[in-house]
Structures are given as structure tokens and as C-alpha cells.
Image (cartoon, rainbow, N blue to C red):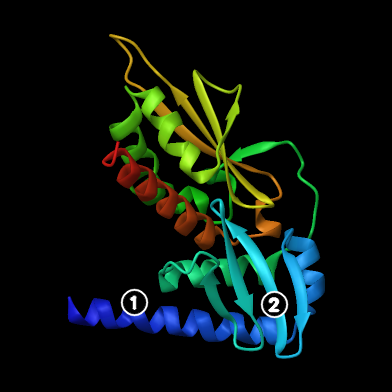
Amino acid sequence: MAADKNRSVYNLDVAYTQVRERLAAADIEEQCRRSGSEYERLDSGETATVYYLNRPCLVTFPECKVSPVDSSELPFREQILILHYLATAKGTAATGKLIPFRDLPGGVVYYPTFSKRTMEPLTRFFGREPELLKKVCQRLGAQPSDMGDTGIVINAFPRVPITMVLWHGDEELSPQLNLLFDANILDYLETEDVTVVCEIITWKLVGFSREV
């Protein structure tokens, strides 16, 4: 267990170092434009306000320090996710075409794990309680979608909508839930980051449901 924990921390440290290097070589003002973030130049350096799951987060440069504007804490993994989004964003327009996780690079191979960590728990907790799902999703600024029996769109980032489609099922059919992404998703996040943000959303929603 200790070795796994150390490896996890090490990988996060490496990821943070790599994304800092990418941003050090980037035009921050341009990346803010591409990502739909707010840019400001100060005497002490540059800042970007990135909207992440319905909360503004301030990124300061050149330190690449990420802090929620409301002064709450943000796990290191989520800080890196925000930096990845800012570094990767290409500014492409939404296509309007929705694709499943399987269509992403490596998605077919990783799909069973992705499903186990995201769609299966969401179905287990909310498959028979669509009204509860809609209620907890509102805390992430969700908007309704006309897909499925219950459709919800959560903006993980300004240019990264995630569509949750729930089929309620009946006495014979179990509920089914799917997560869909705009076909331009890789212009903003890599496959691994998509997995991470969907896991984060899943367990935030489960946590919110326990507070209701």
C-alpha cells in the first residue's frame, strides 16, 4: 500500500512539473481566450480565472498556483486537471456531435474500468431516483438535456460539457446511464483527464446525495 501511495504522489508531482513547463512556454492570454477563462495582467504576474464545475478558480503565473476564489481547498489532482485544461485548450467550437468514452483514444481498452468508476456508481445511486440526480446536479450548475428519460449537461469547464443520459427502465429493464462528450473533447482534455473529471463528478454527486 505504501509503495502504491508513493507512486501515486510521484506521478502527480511529475504531471504537475510537466504541465508547468507547458504553460511556461505558452501565451497565457491566448490560452485563456481558447479555454473561455478570464485573463488579467498584474504587476506581480499574470492570472487566469478558470471556471471548474461551477466554481471559479484562480491560477497565478509564473507559479502555476491554483486556488478556488472562495478560498476553499482543492485536491492536488484537481489542481493539475485545471492546469491541463488551460494548457491543452485549442479554442475549437463545439461540434454538436456527442460521442461515448469508447470513441476516445484508448477508450475501448479502458472502458470497463471507466464504467466501473463512473457510470455504474451513478446508475446504482440514481438510476431509480432521477429527481434526486437532477437536484444534486444543480450544485454543479447543470442544465437539462432532452436526451434519454432524464438528460443533464454538466460543464466541467467552459468548453467541456459532459452529457449524462439516464434511461429509467421498468419492472423488466434495469436503469441505464451513459456519459457523452462533444466530439471536440480532445481539443481540451486528454483521455486520462476525461476519466479523472468524470470520476470526480461521480463522487461529488454521490456525496451531495448523502447530504439531502
Give the labeled residue for mark 2: 47
Residue at position x 64%, y 64% from top?
50
Q: Nearer the viewer, residue 30 or 104?
A: 30
**Residue 115: quarter of image:** top left
Q: Which residue is mark 1?
A: 8
Q: Which amino acid type is marked by label 2?
A: Thr
Question: Which percent across, then down, holds residue 170?
Answer: 33, 10
Q: Secondary structure at mark 1?
A: helix
Whether residue 123 is situated above or below residue 86 in the rendered picture: above
Which quadrant of the structure image shows residue 5? bottom left
Q: For mark 2, does the 10 Å Cα neighbourhood hold few (<14), some (14 to 19), or many (20 or more) residues?
A: many
Residue for point 34% across, 43% down: 208
Foreground label between 2 and 1? 2
The front one of 86 and 41 is 41
Which of the marked residues, 2 or 1, is nearer the chain's N terminus? 1
Q: Amino acid at mark 1?
A: Ser
Q: Position of residue 80 (x, y in %)?
A: 51, 72
Task: Inspect this view and state whether residue 58 appears.
Answer: yes
- The quarter in which the N terminus is drawn is bottom left
Q: Quadrant of the C terminus?
A: top left
Q: Is residue 212 above or below residue 24?
A: above
Q: Dot 1: within a 10 Å radius of its alpha carbon, few (fewer than 14), some, or many (20 or more) residues?
A: few
Q: Which mark is residue 43?
A: none
Judge by depth and name the residue closer to the eye, 203 or 117. Answer: 203
